[in-house]
Amino acid sequence: MGKTHERIDGRLREFIEAQPVFFTATAPLDGDGTVNLSPKGLRGSFAVVDDRTVAYLDFAGSTAETVAHLRENGRITLMWCAFQGPPNIVRVHGKGEAVFRDDERWEGLMARFPDIDVTQHGLRAVIVVRAEVVRDSCGYGVPFMSYDEDRDLHARRFAREDDDSLSAYFAKKDHIATSMDGLPGLPLPLPPLPRPAP
């Protein structure tokens, strides 16, 4: 039923790149801490970097639990489900890192997302995940569901923010700079968003 893969390539890569939504799961080291599970969408915001590494864009939200957990321990699982076509579930268990705007790797990573307008969505970080275990399973219990289109509400909300106003917005939120369990979250104020060279 399930199979472990050595790398993210071929049909496996094609499958995960074709999915319009995936899920991320992280947790603090403290056994009483809050497990976080988040859906991720928006076409063009996920990329396979190489056959053991993936990355996705971390946009503005009401918390920064994933960032906080990765800063503490790096553990992360990503999951894709086939909601159309043959049943399939793929999980990437690995070590993740939040790469922030002032990191020297930022420009190179952003080149992986050519279809994303960086002035939209309140871009906070790039999450880079190095796969340790890659497994698929049957997905027989996953229902058929149709994908219509991405919602435009996120872009409409955050496109009007600049670096200063976005930092001020995050500073007002309870769980951006600090996680729900008191871990360091998103460093504030945000460094200026690097603009692509003309």
Image: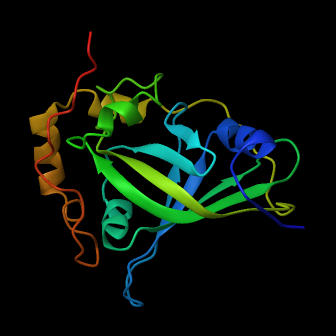
Q: Is residue 21 left or right of residue 89?
A: left
Q: Residue at x 37, y 32 (%)?
A: 108
Q: Position of residue 94 (x, y in %)?
A: 54, 64
Q: Is residue 36 left or right of residue 136?
A: left
Say if 180 sits above or below 100 in the image. Answer: below
Q: Position of residue 31 (x, y in %)?
A: 42, 90
Q: Residue at x 24, y 74 (%)?
A: 183
Quadrant holding the C terminus? top left
Q: Is residue 134 left or right of residue 114?
A: right
What colour scheme governs how the chains and residues are painted in the rendered image of this protein?
rainbow
Picture quadrant where residue 73 is located: bottom left
150, 179: nearer the viewer: 179
Quadrant holding the N terminus? bottom right
Q: Residue at x 37, y 23 (%)?
A: 117
Say if 141 sits above or below 45 in the image. Answer: below
Q: Position of residue 20 (x, y in %)?
A: 63, 39
Picture quadrant where residue 179 is located: bottom left
Farthest residue in the bottom direction? 31
